[in-house]
Image: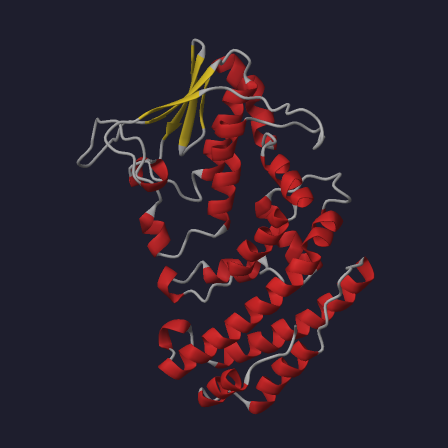
């Protein structure tokens, strides 16, 4: 399974002037990794160290070439070869160990960890399997077209976590729990009936609760700055027993072509996407967080996968005005 690079791949690296010793380190490290059919915690620790040697060897090769935007065609092909090889190793490792890694991080399924925190706890437990916060922050300084895909292993690992029913169900439950901030704000919302959360607002009007898009600078588009405010707003309406139905609507624009008009949502914030400022975890957190909560409701502290569904659900309406583009649609 772990046979290392092919002769064609080795030749591609050499043609890009990769040091032969560096190529040999990668190939040798790769061949030493033999993944077990029945993973154990002892095997996880040992194989994680072996895999880390592979990641380090591949990383050294990538750092020897210029940044992505400045590579010549041979360097670009060689870099794709290395990143593809590392992705193969990470996926093979996660295919075997993801359930055990998840069980370890969650203390035997007794602890709930959200996706945006889980990937960094994976990075701490098995260095190199997922990027660190520092590595992700560094690549967020690059324009989208100049990225090397540092965050890609986060998505790959989560795909394996969800492929296992036990860890996948538990992770979905974790994402449907109210945010701690929502619980802190609940009494204030019940008292005042309104909260300004920045890029989102939440109001109670009779039996209806309103989640209002308020990212006015970007025509109510969504980005990493809207995630937690929107999820908090949804939490509050689901938790407030005086609210019987939720309504999603965009606030009126305060300037520009649409001034004075309500705009539902311009979808993804393409300005921040182009600049490379949207982390990959934005997409996971959005879909598994406030979007999924509107669809399935809230869970609590009790996790009983074999019992009846006990989510706190309410019907939702959307008031579409001006336009609803992309994710807004």
Decide if residue 259 is on the left or right side of residue 29: left
Q: Quadrant of the N terminus?
A: bottom right
Give coordinates of residue 174: x percent, y percent: 63, 37
Q: Quadrant of the C terminus?
A: top left
Give coordinates of residue 308: x percent, y percent: 67, 24
Looking at the rendering, which quadrant does residue 48 occupy?
Answer: bottom right
Decide if residue 296 is on the left or right side of residue 274: right
Taking the spot 30% from the left edge, 41% from the top edge, the residue there is 218
Looking at the rendering, which quadrant does residue 123 occupy?
Answer: bottom right
Give coordinates of residue 6: x percent, y percent: 55, 82
Give coordinates of residue 225: x percent, y percent: 43, 41
Q: How many marks?
A: 0
Decide if residue 83 is on the left or right side of residue 54: left
Colouring method of the image: secondary structure
Q: Is residue 161 above or below residue 182?
A: below
Taking the spot 60% from the left edge, 26% from the top edge, the residue there is 184
Residue nearer the viewer, 72 or 275:
72
- Residue 72 visible? The answer is no
Looking at the rendering, which quadrant does residue 111 occupy?
Answer: top right
Q: Is residue 25 above or below residue 179?
A: below
Taking the spot 51% from the left edge, 77% from the top edge, the residue there is 63
Q: Is residue 17 above or below residue 157?
A: below
- Residue 197 visible? The answer is yes
| Residue furthest out toward the left | 257
Taking the spot 64% from the left edge, 25% from the top edge, the residue there is 309
């Amino acid at each position: 399974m772990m046979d290392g690079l092919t002769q064609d791949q080795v030749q591609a690296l050499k043609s890009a002037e990769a040091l032969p010793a560096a190529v040999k380190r990668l190939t040798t490290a790769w061949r030493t990794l033999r993944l077990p059919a029945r993973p154990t915690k002892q095997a996880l620790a040992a194989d994680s160290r072996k895999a880390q040697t592979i990641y380090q060897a591949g990383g050294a090769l990538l750092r020897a070439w210029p940044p992505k935007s400045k590579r010549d065609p041979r360097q670009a092909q060689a870099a794709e070869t290395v990143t593809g090889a590392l992705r193969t190793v990470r996926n093979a490792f996660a295919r075997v160990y993801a359930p055990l890694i998840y069980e370890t991080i969650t203390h035997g399924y007794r602890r709930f960890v959200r996706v945006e925190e889980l990937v960094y706890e994976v990075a701490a437990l098995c260095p190199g399997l997922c990027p660190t916060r520092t590595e992700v922050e560094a690549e967020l300084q690059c324009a989208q077209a100049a990225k090397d895909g540092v965050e890609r292993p986060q998505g790959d690992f989560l795909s394996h976590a969800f492929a296992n029913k036990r860890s996948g169900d538990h992770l979905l439950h974790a994402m449907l729990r109210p945010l701690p901030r929502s619980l802190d704000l609940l009494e204030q919302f019940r008292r005042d009936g309104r909260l300004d959360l920045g890029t989102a607002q939440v109001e109670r009007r009779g039996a209806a609760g309103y989640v209002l898009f308020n990212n006015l600078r970007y025509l109510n588009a969504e980005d990493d700055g809207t995630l937690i405010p929107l999820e908090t707003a949804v939490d509050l309406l689901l938790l407030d027993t005086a609210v019987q139905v939720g309504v999603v609507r965009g606030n009126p624009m305060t300037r520009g072509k649409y001034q004075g008009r309500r705009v539902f949502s311009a979808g993804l914030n393409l300005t921040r996407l182009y600049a490379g400022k949207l982390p990959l975890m934005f997409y996971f957190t959005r879909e598994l967080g406030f979007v999924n909560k509107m669809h399935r409701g809230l869970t609590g502290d009790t996790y009983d996968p074999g019992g009846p569904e006990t989510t706190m659900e309410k019907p939702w309406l959307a008031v579409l005005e001006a336009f609803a583009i992309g994710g807004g649609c």
